[in-house]
Amino acid sequence: MLEKFGHGGDLLTAAGLYGLEAGQFVDFSANMNPHGPPDAVRAVLQRYAETIGSYPDPAVRGLRRKLALHHGVEEGSVLVGNGAAELIDLVVRLLLPSEVILAQPCFVEYGDAARKCGIPIRTVALAAEERFALTEQAVRHTMANMRDQGIATGTALWFLGSPNNPTGQLIDAGVIRLLLAEGERVVLDEAFMDFVAEEKAYSFISEAASGYGDRLIVIRSMTKFYAIPGIRLGYMVADEALIAGLSELQVPWSVNSLAQQIGEAVLDDISYAERTMAWLKEERPWLTQQLEQLGLDVAPGHVNYVLFRIPRSFNLKASELQQLMGERGVLIRDASHFEGLGEGYCRIAVRFRQEHELLLQTLREVLAGRKAGGR
């Protein structure tokens, strides 16, 4: 399978599976901004040789300062890490909750971090019939079950994605506030929040920086929006005392100097952000409409990827569609590997119109072949 290491974007594995060179694929399996890195990244790379001989700033002060100004929080409330994955792992290791609660389907690394520490996992199912929304009813039901089983309030840890990966759904603010009002601890993964047009209305960064102690943590990724996955870069915002504790647990120099310089540079590129939002506003609705016209069931979402289900009438599993598309040079994500999704679910990134047209034409060929009983 393409997701050999649990993620999309693995061109080397794709080359081995489908018999093409890595550069021959059009990759819809990884949710990166198709504009590529901002021009500022190239400028940083060109001058980086001048500073590579020096140690990076162990406190990442320049980037933390910029991120704090960007979000209107105190610098002490920000911790930068080697991608969001490191930060997820740090939170679990420091807080060591009685259990981790996942609203599935969700990002696999929440559960991975819990399993590495031997922490039990409790799941809340997100239903397609409810547009994969996490409802207050489901939250209240889960909390009631926890109390009945002797799980004390505030000892567990809820890991929630908003927007959620792979569904693209935002969590209603009322659900988050309910959890906090009940004394629960919440890690809110906002890795794709930069792609949301009304970001400030949905983000909980300001709340995380003050007033909730260790009960609200917001994690962000810089690799998706700025298309720099090769530079592992993420950050979290939380109460200053909690950030200090996490910082002590962090491996020294986990954020290298190149990542720090690139992080500072991309935050200044306002035109890049505006161009990205204008592209997404046009391309996501168009792609959704085209997929629906092919007879696919598209889940509603807000960001730079689309989750869809292959109806049973096609007699085609997601793994089979991925194989047939990959053989034709188009990579998609088999989303059936996400807990809580069936064998007919796929996820694709939103890219440019010309690439979408290639994707759609390849899908037409494959789906028509299945209806005709061929391969």
Image (cartoon, rainbow, N blue to C red):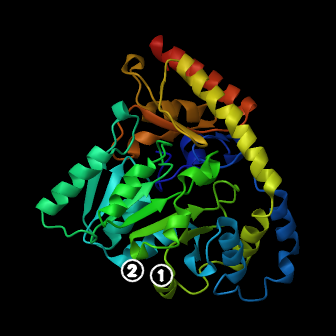
- How many neighbours does mark 1 have within 10 angstroms: few (below 14), some (14-19), or many (20 or more)? some
Q: Residue at x 39, y 80 (%)?
A: 94
Element at badge 1? helix
The answer to which quarter of the image holds residue 152 is bottom left
Q: Nearer the viewer, residue 353 or 25?
A: 353
Comes first in the chain, label 2 or label 1: 2
Mark number for residue 94? Answer: 2
Q: CA distance from mark 2 to mark 1?
A: 7 Å
**Number of numbered discs visible in the structure rendering:** 2
Q: Residue at x 65, y 69 (%)?
A: 72
Q: Residue at x 64, y 45 (%)?
A: 197
Residue denoted by label 1: 246
Element at badge 2? helix
Mark number for residue 371? Answer: none
Drawn side of residue 145 relative to residue 166, left or right = left
Drawn side of residue 152 relative to residue 293, left or right = left
Q: Residue at x 39, y 70 (%)?
A: 215
Residue 320 in view:
yes
Q: Nearer the viewer, residue 304 or 319?
A: 304
Q: Nearer the viewer, residue 315 or 290?
A: 290
At label 2, the amino acid type is Leu
* Image location of residue 69, percent across then percent down: 70, 71
Residue 12 in view:
no
Q: Is residue 252 above or below residue 371?
A: below
* Image location of residue 252, percent across then percent down: 57, 87
* Image location of residue 278, percent across then percent down: 74, 40
At label 1, the amino acid type is Leu
Given contact means CB atoms under 8 Å apart, are the residues at marks 2 and 1 in contact?
Answer: yes
- How many neighbours does mark 2 have within 10 angstroms: few (below 14), some (14-19), or many (20 or more)? some
